[in-house]
Amino acid sequence: QVQLVESGGGLVQAGGSLRLSCAASGRTFSSYAMGWFRQAPGKEREFVASVRRIGSRTYYADSVKGRFTISRDNAKNTVYLQMNSLKPEDTAVYYCAAAEYYSGSYSSNEYDYWGQGTQVTVSS
């Protein structure tokens, strides 16, 4: 069992930056690939970024590539999402998730554990 708690969300103007954190507890953090997803009002949850267990391989949705960076610190049991050049369309609840067996796909079905989410609002 893994518990995930996101933090760092908030209100920011377009063009600004935020860094989200996701702290994990429970089973060995380094055993899991980690991902970030987001869900805007009236829309389905969508993949944002992911990082493999050791952290050298990352994946990004086209909509955030070049603006967002995912990273992990296995010593701190934490995964981060650095978000730069934010746009109003980035407004959503952001969720982190953990996957024990990860193929590298963008599907939420690969993830076993989810956090409660943190709200990110980007004003124009």
Image (cartoon, rainbow, N blue to C red):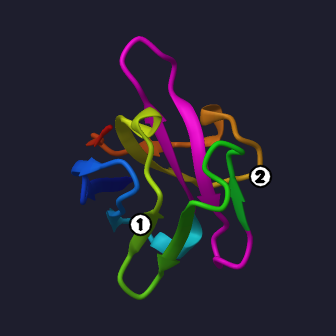
In the image, residue 23 above or below residue 103:
below
Q: Earlier in the sequence, mark 2 or mark 1?
A: 1
Residue 20 left/right relative to 105: left
Q: Mark 1 — residue?
A: 27
User: Helix, strand or loop at disc 2?
Assistant: loop
The extreme bottom residue here reads 75
Residue 61, image quadrant: top right
Residue range of the region highlighted in magenta in the rendering: 33-57
Q: Nearer the viewer, residue 75 or 28?
A: 75
Residue 27 left/right relative to 10: right
Q: Mark 2 — residue?
A: 104
2 within the magenta span: no
In the image, residue 90 above or below residue 19:
above
Residue displayed at 77% across by 52% down: 104
Q: Nearer the viewer, residue 91 or 43?
A: 91
The extreme front residue here reads 124
Q: For the residues carrying marks 2 and 1, which lies nearer the camera in this image? A: 2
Task: State how far apart marks 2 and 1 are (Cα).
Answer: 21 Å
Residue displayed at 65% across by 40% down: 110
Q: Nearer the viewer, residue 6 or 20?
A: 20
Residue 32 horizontal/vertical position (percent): 57, 63
Asked if the residue under mark 1 is in contact with the one under mark 2, i.e. CB atoms within 8 Å, the reply is no
Give the amino acid at mark 2: Gly
Give the amino acid at mark 1: Arg
Residue displayed at 44% across by 43% down: 87
